[in-house]
Structure formats: structure tokens, C-alpha cells
Amino acid sequence: LSPPALPPPPPAAMAKSSSATATATASGTKKRKSKSGALTHEEVKALGLELLSSRAHLNHAPTLLALLSPTAPLSIALEALISLQSFFEPLLSSIPSASAAAAAAGGASDDPELVFGAWLRQRFDEFVAALVELSVSPHSDEAIREVALDAFMDFVKLGKDGSFHSAIYHKFLHAVVHATNSIDDVLELLGSKYSKYADVCFFTYTSLDKIANSLGSQTTGSGKDVLQNGDDGAEDRSAICVRNVYNILVHIPALDFKKESKFDMWSTVGLSSKGEKDTSEGSSATRISKKLKLKFTKAWLAFLKLPLPLDVYKEVLATLHQNVIPSMSNPAILCDFLTTSYDIGGVISVMALSGLFILMTQHQLEYPKFYDKLYALLTPAVFMAKHRSVFLQLLDACLKSSYLQAYLVASFAKRLSRLTLSVPPAGALIIIALIHNLLRRHPSINFLVHWEVAQDDGVASLPKKIGADPFNNEETDPAKSGAMRSSLWEIDTLRHHYTPAVSRFVASLETDLTVRAKTMEMKITDFSSGSYATVFRDEARRRIKQVPLAFYRSTPTSLFQESDFPGWTFGCQSNMGAQASVEGNAVHTLETVDASPAKRSRV
């Protein structure tokens, strides 16, 4: 016979027992603390070893989690991080989902394993949040930031069934995008260590697409204000988030999809979300390339729909044709963004020309008013812009086709000729080279160089008055500018330009450019980056055989002489040593008593 069961203890006894246990636990924790009240490195290491040894010490996990702070001592934070990473890695496959953990925590089940799973899930989420904070926080030490990011990416790699843990990776990118401080350090680590893996790039583009769409829905205002400066006070959070999204996109190295035959993966399964690995390497590479291009395109399109600050907008336009268009699945999708940018005018249109030119020449984009907008961009400000070199090369390429109408080419040549009157010397050199190429490519406009005015009894046969230019420089439509009835008289004025380089270079237009066998096109790249500094440097390097000198018969005592200004007298002339009197072509010198040694007078 078994002994009778003991009655359950009364509630007071149970309360007393639990309080005793809590007191014992508290006393044990106090024993591990130093005299100052903070845990030492040895004590933190002992807590970690006990946590890894038995489930009886699970309560050490919250204690170690509390030590993961950017402001905590480096050695203690590192020890706590390594202990927690070693604790969670073997249990990663048994951690329940967030929904299952929420149901167990809500009291839906009394199973101890489910309760433990919910507790484990909660602690794991706290650990992931601590790793993200250590990686993103500007107060984190460089060593612990790298260790925290490596530990975090290990959990991303060890997802269920070896698949990429995209959920916690999305949390990491969300924290990086919404960070208010600089994220350059974490982006450098992420780009140098993990952006070379195709699955990391794939899920980065996927998360950025979602984050950008979320930012776009939260943006309030009158649409896409791309011209906000942000100079009038502190920037709002949306502008900071947009900059962070852009920084993440540009830190991902561009993948050469044409040369890549095999992609490296960070996770075991790769891009598959079902845990099944594709064994066909050839088809897998093609499929991965298509998926990456699709996600790359979606991420950039979602980003370009955001209200971009002006500095970010210029950077995007400057690099779009090199870093974005070649990797997109369908670059023609960018036509709306580029045409809108091209219609803005000013430097924005100049920078948008590169991407628009690629879409027109390589992707069959039709833009009927392209040359009208290009004609309107020819202003003196273009020749002093930062990106003038690329713009002028594209301008020369856009006017290379032999199918352009004569009135259009004549309008561009005349517009450029008129600009020589107001641009710097380096700009005048570029214009001469551009007009040289236009006259050589299009012989039908060579009449602009020299207008033959037929006269009959002293009366001009042309309906225009001699000396009046029918060209309208204010007209924005090349067809109505009147360039076909004008001439390039502005080029003739460059013969007397104050810069010797310009006056010498304009002589290249005196040759007969219609004879293509004896002439050749000029390379705009040789002149497009010119400036005052380059013109001065070239002149300083020239070797001059004869140098003009000034000789005086007597030492001058003033800048001007009275004979230069008849009827005027100059006062305040003290210690005058000599006076020169010029009458006709003769020079008479009147020497005073204190005359200096005779020198030749300047005439």
C-alpha cells in the first residue's frame, strides 16, 4: 500500500516558500557583484558559463542582456554578447514564431514547453534588438560594432532549415534607415563583408523596396518636392531617411550579370524561401540574375518616387547612367523620372541629359521636344557648371547625326556663336571646336561663315538691312530663331579676343571645312574641362621668342601725360622731373635742372 498523499500546503506557505526562493536568488546575485555594485569581467564570464551549462540558470539571460549597451564597458559587453550568442545559436531551430509565442504568452496553453518557447522567443527578440543597437549606435566601440554585426549576420544565416532569416534582417535595415546619426561605419562593414553575397543583396533590395514604399506613404505635402535644400534649419526625419536609403543603395557593389556564372550565397539555401536548394548551376545562375535585376529595379524605382533632397537628387542624376541603368531589368521605366528632370531646366536638366541620352540611343525612347529643351539649355551658366564637361560631350554627340534638319543645326551654331560674347575664354575655345565640327558634318550651313550680299546699283538685294542681325536670341524654338538668315559674325570678333589662345584657335575655322578628306573633327574632350586655370597654365608654358619692351627717354612721373588728355590739367604732381610734349608726330623733351639721365620717352 502506498502512503497517503500529503495535503497541499496552504497559500501562505506557498507565498513564504516563493519569497524564500527569491531571497536566495537575490542573495546569490549579490554575491557575484563587486563592492561597487557592478559586475566584473570574471563575474560576467561565470554567469555565461552557468547559462550554457544548465536550464536551471536561464534567469542569467536577462542579466546578460542588460549588459549589452553601447555605453557599457567594452570587455563586459563583449563577454555578455559572446555568451548569449553561444546560448541562442543551438536553440535557434526550436524558437517558435512570433504568433505562436504570442499565443503561448497570452495563456492559451499550459504546456511548459510552449511557455518556455514563448519566453525564449521574447529573450531572442531582445537580443536581436540589442545587436542592432550596438551595430547602428554611434556610441558603440568599433570592435563591438563589428562583433555585433557578425553575430547578427550569423543568426540571419542560420534561419530555419538553412534559409535566409529575412524577418530580422528587415528589422536591421529598418533601424539603419531610421537612424538619426551617421551610418557610414556600419555600411562600410556591411558592404565590405556581406554585400558580395547574392542573397544578401537580394533581401537588401527587397527590404529597401518595402521601406521606401512605407516612407512614400508617410510623406505629406504637395507631391515630389525634389528641390528642397534643407539649409533653413534642421532637416526633418523623412529627408534623413531618404539619404540613408540612398547610402545603402550606393554601398551595394554593382554585380556584372553578364560575366557572373556563379553567385556566392551567405545562407545555405540561397534565395529560396522553401528550404530547397537548386542543384542546376547553369539554370540557377540565370534565375538568380533575373531575380536580382527585378529586385534591383523595384528598389530603385521605389526610392526615386520619394521626395529627394536637392543634393541627393544631383548625385542620383550624376551616376544614374553608369551605376543604375546598366543593371536594371527594363531601363525604359526611368523615362518618366528622366524626362521630368530634363524639363526642370538649369543644372538639373544638364545632369539628366546623360541618362536620357542612353535611353534614346540604346532603348528606343522617343522624346519629340528633346532638341528644343537642349537648345534652351545653352546659356552662359552652362559653361561654368560643375558637370559642363559631360554635358558638352553629349551636346556634340547629339548633333552628330546627318539626318538633322539644316535649320536646327544652324540654330545651334548661331546660339553657340552668340555665347562667345559672354562666356569665359575656356568656353570660347569649346564653342569654336563645336562649331568646327558642326560646319564639317553639315555642309549645308557653311553659308553662315560668309554671307555674300549681292548689290545692284548700290542697293542690297536682300530684304534685310546691312548690319542688322535677324537672329532672335530670346526665341526658345529653333525653327523660329531666324538663324538661317543670319551669319556667324560673332566668330569674327574672336580674332581680336583678349586671350591669345582664343584668337589663335579661331583661325581653324578659316579652312574649307567642306573638304572632309583634308580636315578632321576636333575632340571635345580636349577642351570640355577647360577653365581660367588651364588657359593660364597653357600660356605660362609657351616659349616666347620675342618679348615686347617699353623704352622711355626720361623716367615717367605719372601714369598719364597731359598731352594724352587735351584741355585737362593734372594737379598734385610733385617732384616732376620731366615733361613730354607731343605735337603731331614730333616729340619735344623739356629737361629741368634736376633731370635724371636721359632715357627714351614712351610715345
Image (spheres, rainbow, N blue to C red):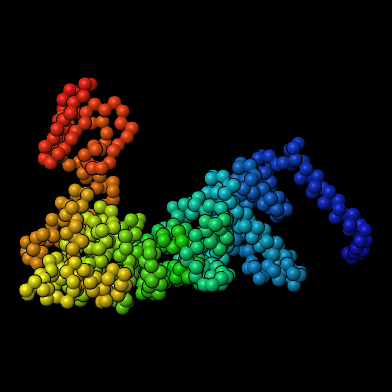
Residue lying at the far front in this picture: please name it. Answer: 567
Q: Quadrant of residue 518?
A: bottom left
Question: Which image quarter holds the N terminus?
Answer: bottom right
For residue 555, above or below residue 538:
above
Q: Visible in this render: residue 173?
A: no
Tag count = 0
Left or right placement of residue 387 versus residue 511 in this view: right
The answer to whether residue 222 is above or below residue 52 is: below
Residue 261 % position (x, y):
33, 64
Q: Residue 494: x, y in percent?
A: 19, 56
Instruction: Please tell me which residue is depicted at 61% across the width and 57% down the height of the picture.
Output: 128
Q: Is residue 440 left or right of residue 128?
A: left
Residue under the point 25% across and 66% down: 415
Q: Quick one: which residue is furthest to the top in this view?
A: 593
Depth order, front residue of 423/184: 423
Task: State the residue in front, 373 or 91.
Answer: 373
The image quarter in which residue 599 lies:
top left
Identified at 58% across, 51% down, the residue is 137
Q: Name the quadrant of the C terminus.
A: top left
Residue 121: in sight, yes or no?
A: yes
Residue 519 pos. (x, y %) = 9, 61
Residue visible at 34% across and 62% down in the picture: 322
Q: Nearer the viewer, residue 332 or 108?
A: 332
Q: Position of residue 191 (x, y in %)?
A: 45, 55
